[in-house]
Amino acid sequence: MASSYTSKPLSTLVDVMHQGINTAADKVEYEAKGTAIIQSRNFTSGNLDLNDVKYLGQADSYKYGAKYTPIAGDILFSNIGTVGRSVIVASERNFVFAWNVFLIRVNHTKIDKTYLKFYLDYLHDIGVYESWFTGGTVKFLNKKTIGSIEIPLPPLETQKQIAAVLEKADQLRKDCLQMEQELNSLAQSVFIEMFGDPLINPKGWRVRTLNEFYASAKTGTKCGPFGSALKKDEFVDSGVPVWNMSNISLTGEFIDSPSLWITEKKYQNLEAYNVLQGDVIISRAGTVGKMGVVLSKYDRSIISTNLIRVRFGEDLLPLYFVCLMTYCKTRLKRLKVGDDGSFSHMNTGILDNLEFPYPPMNEQLKYMKFREELDAQINCLKQLKIEQELNFSSLMQKAFNGELNLDNAKTQ
């Protein structure tokens, strides 16, 4: 990477650097309890998580422990699969690491560990590692490649100052994310407080089937990669949007960013699949049951075949239904298997017979008002998070190109 700093290969800046235990080649047998062995997935979020791990028995723990147990300050680096994620081990913890994890123990007289961790993350964010992959189906970085990474090397004290600036900016990003998660948790808590657990119905609301509330329900048109009603050459650069699963986030947010468009003339032939403000669209394949309320600036649009559009009458608020089904995910999971036992799906017939507690409209309206106020706060946080992300990316680029004004950065 171009930088005003001199650089040195990573291998010259470390005391220890090696890959984890090759559990397949060594035929490691896991136990129900013992010493945790982590994979790269245990820190791809940026934090070390020892949940969902396998365990080495006493004999293997003794065999591998000395070499493969990290100490506080070590960097763990993902070198296979999701390549380039890293985490600093914050404290002494009894675990070892597997083949898709690299341990990097820096020489503290040459490089600051936090500075190095940020630089490794920076290379990941700008897509550098992809050009260094070796291997066939499974891409990875080998020790030689990792050791040859050129690290821009300002004086040690400057490294620590840069790391401090980046840590502060990184924490602002994390704070935004945490606040957003807390507000989403609040939405769930208030729903349960107002309506009770829908699967238990402790408030004794009347239980009704979903088809009692339909104005209409429609499976989308076959188009694009999902069928043959629309061919590739019938899509245009702008016009009438065609919504698909990518327009619903995992948290139920409707994403008003069309990727497929058709002409007005074509829309007239497919108007039966139209979508209006306030409709609920539900994925019926893939991530079955993912759903969101349509909030679109377009006055006309259609859904593709992987979606179901539900339009309610006046007795049920779309937001209540979406929140209700969010808390009934276990029920949705039981509906995933198709009639042939092989294909996960959902259809209007399944939706028709869904039973759920029906609270009075005034209670639904109270929750909707609360959510409107809460969603406004969440949207403000999302915008702030975007700004913090852009600021962090800018600081990273300047820091490793030798362009960061440390005096100004400290006061920001």
Image (cartoon, rainbow, N blue to C red):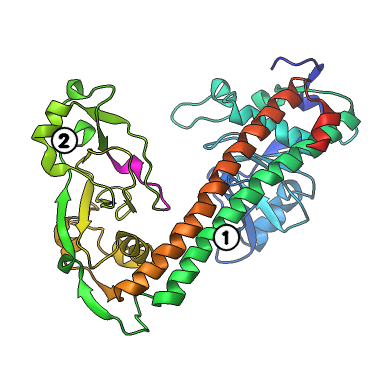
Mark seen at residue 313:
none
Q: In this view, does 314 lie above or below 29?
A: below
Q: Judge whether residue 121 can be spotted in this image.
A: no
Q: Mark 2 points at which residue?
A: 227
Q: What stretch is highlighted in magenta?
A: 243-251
Front residue of this view, candidates 217 and 30 = 217
Which residue is depicted at the point 64% across and 27% down?
A: 123
Residue 325 is covered by the magenta coloring: no
Which residue is depicted at the point 61% across and 37% down?
A: 387
Front residue of this view, candidates 114 and 183 = 183
Which residue is depicted at the point 40% across and 47% down?
A: 249
Q: Position of residue 259 (x, y in %)?
A: 32, 31
Q: Name the residue under label 1.
A: 182
Q: Judge whether residue 331 can be spotted in this image.
A: yes
Q: How crowded is mark 1: few (under 14 residues within 10 Å), some or many (20 or more)?
A: few
Q: Where is residue 97 in the image (x, y as percent from the top left)?
A: 64, 48
The Cα–Cα distance between marks 2 and 1, rounded to whole angstroms, is: 40 Å
Nearer to us: label 2 or label 1: 1
